[in-house]
Image (cartoon, helix red, strand yellow):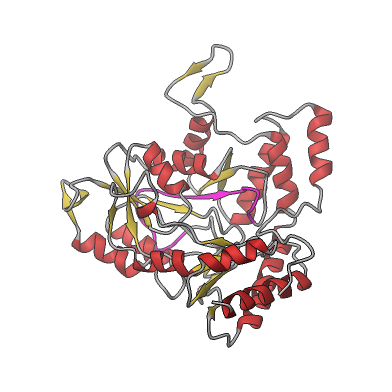
Amino acid sequence: MGGCKEEIPLSVPCLKGNEWNYVKECLDTNWVSYVGPFVKRFEKELAVVTDARHAVAMSSGTAALHVALILAGVKPDEEVVMPALTFVAPANAVRYCGAWPVLIDIQGCDWQMDIDQLSHFLSDSCVRRRGLLFNKITGRRVAALLPVHLLGAMCDVDAVAELATMYELPLIEDAAECLGATYKNRPIGASTPAYNGPLRIVVTSFNGNKVMTTGGGGALLANENSVADRAMHLSTTAKVDDFEFLHDEVGYNYRLTNIAAALGVAQLEQLNDHVEFKRMVAHRYEGIFLGHSHITAHPEARQCRSTFWLYTVLLDIQSKPIVEYLNSKGIMARRVWLPITDVPPFKDKVFSTGCQMANHLHEYALNIPCSVGITPGQIETVAEQLTFAISRH
């Protein structure tokens, strides 16, 4: 089968709204750094969209995760529980605090963190001492739960929240991949009735390949004034006096720039349309692959309305040669992430409850083009080339 007439990217920005006008306003008014009217406007409008009381815009989702873990009180040589299959950012943020990830497998029904395995880890592999929870195998304190909502959907938020409440653990949700998604009709920043623990924070990202982008950037979402205020303080170098350059603790230069926030405001105006487009792409692919014996389409749990951020299919043959073939034809496809257990800085250094499904997805699943703006013809080309590649193997 011949190659494509044009390259089809995996997931690229769609900048067709007021982006140019708003960025030009920043340049015309000289508000280009991390202070300026668009930063406040973006935070206010993001809070509304996500149903959070507060949004604190930062330079990346990873920066927001780092601040969230600090607020949760995560200390060196403690542990944070997270899924084994994810982009490396949350694991990195845990290490920024000197702590270590505990890795939970993915469940096959929705490709999210395995709730049963998480429950068994907390009940069977942990013990309470002096009101704190400790991993019986490593001897380290378990400091927080960090579920990562994967591939545009959300994990079973209430089930995780109930466990976090039961074990009195802070809950830090990494929603970097699912801005615009809902769980039981609740946006990512909405209050979770099932949680009654010490602290809940949600983090998201606006990287260039996300459903909406600021070029780079992220945000911390909170529903308590004190949490948002402290996040703002830490991400602004913990400055307490602009004239004397007084900083009352170690802070971080993590704030989002006004130019990036201007892009964000324009992108938020189009977020609903972008999500609907991504869902349309997912449904087109699902219809094409329906009944194909070698392809399992991207699942969607009943309680979740996914954005299908990176449309992913699971094959019954290894994905690596298929990805290589598609890329040779100008179709950008990617394997699903390497499980954190096999990423060199973490290999043989982290506690894992087993990663059978995470390894299976890495070996047999792949992301295929799904940009906002991909054409029906491009979708057909991707599907044709994918099915042809499978037939050759």
Residue 181 visible here: no
Q: Which quadrant of the rendered structure holds the C terminus?
A: bottom right
The residue under the point 66% across, 64% down is: 369
Given residues 198 and 219, the one toward you in this image is 219
Q: Is residue 378 left or right of residue 341?
A: right
Coordinates of residue 37 in the picture (x, y in percent)? 72, 35
Say which residue appears at 58% left-offset and 85% top-offset. Answer: 292
| Residue 286 at x, y percent in the picture | 62, 79
Residue located at (25% from left, 66% from top): 120
Nearest the eye: 289 or 112: 289
User: How would you classify the magenta stretch by its main secondary structure?
Assistant: loop
Q: Position of residue 243 (x, y in %)?
A: 58, 13
158 displayed left or right of 1: left
Q: Nearer the viewer, residue 356 or 235?
A: 356
365 falls in the magenta region: no
Inspect this view and state whether residue 288 appears: yes
Q: Tell me the quarter of the picture where residue 256 sits.
A: top right
Tell me: residue 227, above or below residue 343: above
Among all residues in the image, which is located at the extreme bottom?
291
**Compared to 326, does 96 lie above or below?**
above
Magenta residues? Answer: 192-210
Residue 374 drawn at (x, y percent): 74, 65
Q: State the image quarter where residue 353 is shown.
A: bottom left
In which quarter of the view is residue 29 placed?
Answer: top right
Residue 204 colored in magenta in the image = yes
